[in-house]
Image (cartoon, helix red, strand yellow):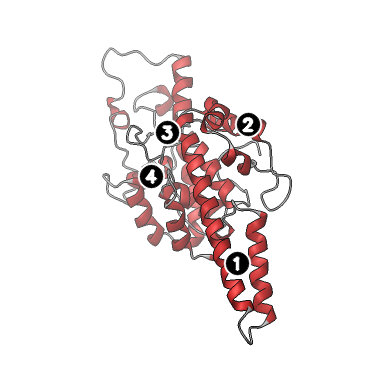
């Protein structure tokens, strides 16, 4: 419960909202946002989402209270607004589904020859919705493409977030393209240098075998955060660069001023330790998919 991001949580809505919290901020700040929600609204005490944030309380709260609870994570106003919008959409969807099922149940109950088993099944569906009007369990019954379409309809949720939820929460193959994966796919020549992140996903999703999607995602993520040559903010010619042995050096064509030896203009001094630490925090910041005009994609 202490970590933001989709991770290994079984509740799909919880996975989506955790991932939203992790956008455009460091992991530490995202976790502080999650802690703020926990302290303000409490945790679910039963059901499939037991131990997750009590999202019902978040939906019923006013926006200012939600924003206040997540303010330490950055972009609190935008994220709070998106969280409230998503919760309301799911609530209304499930309410409509329940009302439709009740209407169908009433019609079927008056029909001659309708099996009792069919009515019992309908009763069970209605009862399950009543137990949690903020459930997205119905998405597990969809195909992977349908699940993707259903998630990206939600405000602030893009292809990358949906792919992560499919991979880590739904346990299905999906080549989630975060900043590190995106960078390496371009450097390896798998996609053109001008390919967007979503274009990179669309291409690699059909080209990479399902059994390699998870390990490749993890490999690029780890390597992109630790390699002294492939991290976003490292520069050719620096001491760190020269002391790094990159195992894929012969395979990649790194682009950008830093990687091509133009990262430190003539006369410019090396970064101080404090600046280097800040740069490392910036590298750990996840890119945004919040659909706000004033927000731009971060490039680690």
Give the foreground label among 1 and 2. 1
From the viewer's perspective, is 115 left or right of 33? right
**How crowded is the residue under tag 4: few (<14 C-alpha within 10 Å), some, or many (20+)?**
many
Residue at screen point 61% across, 51% down: 11
**Of callouts 3 and 1, the N-terminal one:** 1
At label 2, counting other C-alpha atoms closer than 10 Å, the crowd grade (few under 14, some 14-19, many 20 or more) is many
Residue 244 seen in render: no
Give how far across and how far down residue 110 sits, in percent. Answer: 62, 80
- Work out whether mark 1 precedes mark 2 in sequence or the reverse, and give the earlier one: 2
Position in image of residue 46 (x %, y %): 73, 49
Check disc 1 and report the residue beneath it: 102
The residues bearing labels 4 and 2 have C-alpha atoms spaced at a distance of: 30 Å
Kindly identify which residue carries mark 2.
35
Task: Point out the tag, 4 or 1, that comes first from the N-terminus.
Answer: 1
| Callouts 4 and 1 close, C-beta under 8 Å | no
Q: Report the Cα–Cα distance between label 1 and label 2.
A: 38 Å
Q: Give the labeled residue for mark 4.
A: 182
Residue 155 in picture, x, y percent from top left: 43, 45
Q: Disc 4, disc 2: CB below 8 Å?
A: no
Badge 3 is on which residue? 231
Kindly report the distance in space between the C-alpha atoms of the residues bearing marks 2 and 3.
Answer: 29 Å
Q: Quadrant of residue 266?
A: top left
- Quarter the N terminus occupies: top right
Q: Nearer the viewer, residue 134 or 49?
A: 134
- Locate the C terminus and report the quarter of the image it occupies: top left
């Amino acid at each position: 419960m202490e970590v933001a991001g989709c991770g290994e949580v079984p509740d799909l809505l919880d996975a989506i909202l955790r991932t939203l919290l992790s956008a455009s901020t460091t992991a530490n700040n995202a976790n502080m946002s999650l802690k703020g929600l926990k302290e303000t609204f409490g945790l679910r005490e039963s059901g499939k989402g037991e131990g997750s944030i009590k999202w019902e309380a978040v939906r019923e709260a006013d926006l200012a209270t939600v924003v206040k609870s997540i303010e330490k994570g950055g972009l609190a106003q935008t994220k709070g607004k998106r969280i409230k919008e998503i919760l309301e959409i799911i609530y209304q969807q499930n309410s409509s589904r329940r009302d439709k099922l009740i209407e169908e149940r009433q019609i079927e109950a008056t029909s001659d020859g309708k099996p009792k088993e069919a009515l019992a099944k309908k009763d069970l569906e209605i009862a399950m919705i009543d137990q949690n009007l903020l459930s997205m369990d119905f998405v597990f019954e969809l195909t992977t493409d349908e699940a993707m379409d259903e998630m990206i309809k939600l405000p602030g949720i893009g292809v990358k977030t949906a792919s992560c939820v499919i991979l880590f929460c739904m346990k299905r193959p999906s080549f989630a393209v975060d900043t590190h994966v995106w960078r390496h796919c371009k450097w390896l020549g798998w996609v053109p240098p001008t390919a967007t992140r979503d274009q990179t996903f669309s291409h690699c999703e059909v080209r990479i075998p399902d059994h390699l999607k998870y390990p490749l995602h993890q490999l690029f993520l780890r390597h992109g955060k630790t390699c002294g040559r492939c991290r976003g903010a490292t520069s050719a010619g620096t001491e760190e660069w020269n002391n790094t042995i990159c195992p894929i050096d012969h395979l990649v064509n790194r682009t950008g001023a830093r990687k091509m030896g133009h990262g430190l203009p003539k006369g410019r001094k090396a970064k101080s330790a404090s600046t280097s630490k800040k740069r490392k925090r910036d590298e750990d910041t996840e890119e945004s998919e919040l659909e706000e005009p004033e927000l731009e994609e971060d490039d680690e």
